Image (cartoon, rainbow, N blue to C red):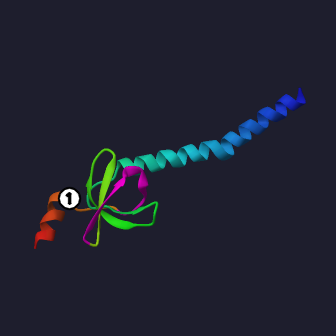
Amino acid sequence: MESILLIVVMIALFYFMLIRPQQKRQKKVQSMQSALKKGDTIATIGGLHGVVDSIDDKQVTLDCHGSLLTFDRQAVRTVLEVSEAPVDSFESNDNN
């Protein structure tokens, strides 16, 4: 009986120490990736930094110093700077 109780305690410990925190991190990353918008400055999992030029359901196009590069949305590691300006005013400032 004690060995069964010990196994149950170890399973519970693994769940709260390993599995649950990983699930929280995964949900946080998914919400960050779904909240991406044009003008955000991001870093990819490969270390590339750029500004989101366009975005669709599965891909993100980055402007990296004049080069447009397309990545899967899952390749976005972190958002470095969130675009505060509305998209229309952001585009009109580039034309001046």
Q: Residue at x 67, y 40 (%)?
A: 15
Task: Please identify the residue farthest to the right as the structure is shown.
Answer: 2
Q: Quadrant of the N terminus?
A: top right
Residue 71 located within the stretch drawn in magenta? yes
Magenta span main SS: strand
- Which residue does the image show at 43% across and 46% down from the upper left? 30
Q: Residue at x 42, y 50 (%)?
A: 74
Question: Which residues, given as a range, are shown in magenta?
Answer: 66-81
Quick check: 20 above or below 95? above
Left or right placement of residue 11 versus residue 19 in this view: right
Looking at this rendering, what residue extends furthest in the top direction?
A: 1
Q: Nearer the viewer, residue 27 or 61?
A: 61
Amino acid type, callout 1: Pro
Q: Where does the C terminus fall, quadrant-wise?
A: bottom left
Which residue in the protein does label 1 denote?
86
* Residue 81 lies in quadrant: bottom left
Left or right: 19 in relation to 75? right
Secondary element under disc 1, as helix, strand or loop, is loop
